[in-house]
Image (spheres, rainbow, N blue to C red):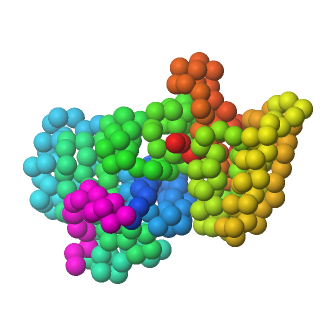
């Protein structure tokens, strides 16, 4: 079997659907090799817990028309020309990580990373695919252009369930990625491999709370996390629906083998979540149910939590 193979994964995905097998799809967005290690490590561990198909994507600067023609003309002789387009070295670094951590099969990694196997799908995108070992198939994608536009296009075209990103120093970029990408978003913010993390799970009567709890179970299993399920009320009382949601979450967590405790807290949601989380929790919460227009002008609670916290956050969208 070749180290890297080009396969019609769209056909395979729909064939599995016909068989009644639901395969989740994860997109891990990486940047520089210097800062993307935690994003790749966390992303692959979570994808492994979901037994998901994984695509790792790097978005580089847009290639000019002349440069694109040069790359296409020299593609068959990249090794001799040393004309690797921006980001090929990052894909090779990601490939080495996958091999070292046994995320790809021995057969598919035997020949190493072969740049000549990159398949150009359009001017701004090329791809290679690997046979997964502990997850489903693993894709490596190189895109060029505006990062938000390119990631949004990738998510929309391949219908990813979860996009995993690092926390950008440009807070506005992280904000825009959360706002404009349609999948659930995991922000690997200030992740420290040596920390003993716990999970903080936001529970309320919103429509997507149950989905957030189910995602939270997989995250807790991936990292062996003690879980605190917290329901926050801004008034003196808790609605019956919130109490029922909290009771359901407790029951679901216990049945899933997740050690947990339930908290009913009075106060402001953002401040309460940030205070409890500190820097040693992974926060899981449902996305805002506000309209896009209201979120644009007033923001949303998940966005505000992300902006105020010092730890990783998973925002689960419907």
Question: Where is residue 45 shown, x and y percent of the image?
Answer: 54, 65
Look at the picture and state if 34 lies above or below 148. below
Viewer-proximal residue, 218 or 96? 218
Query: Which region shows up in magenta?
Result: 1-20
Which residue is found at the position 34% from the left and 60% from the top?
Answer: 17
Question: Where is residue 199 shown, x and y percent of the image?
Answer: 71, 56
Which image quarter: residue 92?
A: bottom left
Which residue is found at the position 62% from the left and 50% from the top?
Answer: 210
Question: Where is residue 233 shown, x and y percent of the image?
Answer: 81, 35
Number of disc labels: 0
**In the rendered image, is residue 296 in sight?**
no
Question: Where is residue 44 shown, x and y percent of the image?
Answer: 49, 63
**Which quarter of the rendering shows the N terminus?**
bottom left
Question: Which residue in the rendered view is the most extreme toward the right?
Answer: 236
Viewer-proximal residue, 309 or 49? 49
Query: With 288 as the anchor, is 33 left or right in this view?
Result: left
Look at the picture and state if 199 lies above or below 63. below
Viewer-proximal residue, 109 or 6? 6
**In the rendered image, is residue 154 in sight?**
yes
> Does the stretch in magenta take in 216?
no
Question: Which residue in the rendered view is the most extreme toward the left?
Answer: 73
Which residue is found at the position 60% from the left and 66% from the top?
Answer: 222
Look at the picture and state if 271 lies above or below 195. above
Viewer-proximal residue, 248 or 261? 248
Query: With 315 as the anchor, is 101 left or right in this view?
Result: left
Which residue is found at the position 37% from the left and 71% from the top?
Answer: 132
């Amino acid at each position: 079997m070749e180290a890297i193979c080009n396969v019609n994964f769209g056909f395979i995905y729909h064939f599995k659907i016909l068989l009644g097998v639901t395969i989740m799809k994860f997109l891990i967005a990486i940047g520089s090799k210097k800062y993307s290690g935690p994003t790749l490590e966390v992303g692959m561990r979570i994808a492994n817990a979901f037994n998901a198909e994984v695509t790792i994507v790097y978005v580089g600067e847009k290639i000019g028309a002349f440069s694109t023609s040069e790359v296409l003309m020299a593609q068959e002789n990249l090794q001799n020309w040393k004309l690797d387009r921006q980001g090929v070295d990052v894909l090779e670094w990601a490939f080495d990580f996958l091999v070292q951590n046994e995320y790809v099969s021995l057969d598919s990694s035997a020949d190493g990373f072969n740049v000549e196997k990159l398949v150009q799908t359009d001017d701004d995108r090329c791809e290679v695919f690997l046979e997964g070992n502990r997850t489903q198939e693993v894709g490596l994608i190189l895109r060029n252009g505006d990062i938000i536009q390119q990631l949004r296009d990738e998510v929309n075209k391949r219908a990813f369930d979860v996009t995993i990103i690092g926390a950008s120093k440009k807070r506005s970029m992280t904000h825009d990625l959360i706002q404009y990408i349609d999948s659930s978003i995991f922000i690997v913010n200030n992740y420290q491999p040596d920390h003993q993390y716990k999970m903080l799970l936001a529970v309320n009567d919103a429509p997507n709370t149950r989905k957030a709890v189910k995602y939270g179970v997989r995250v807790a299993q991936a990292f062996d996390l003690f879980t605190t399920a917290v329901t926050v009320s801004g008034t003196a009382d808790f609605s019956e629906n919130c109490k029922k949601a909290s009771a359901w979450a407790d029951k679901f967590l216990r049945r899933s083998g997740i050690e947990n405790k339930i908290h009913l807290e009075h106060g402001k949601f953002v401040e309460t979540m940030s205070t409890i989380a500190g820097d040693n929790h992974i926060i899981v919460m449902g996305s805002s149910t506000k309209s896009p227009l209201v979120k644009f002008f007033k923001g949303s609670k998940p966005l505000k939590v992300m902006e105020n916290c010092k730890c990783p956050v998973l925002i689960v969208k419907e």
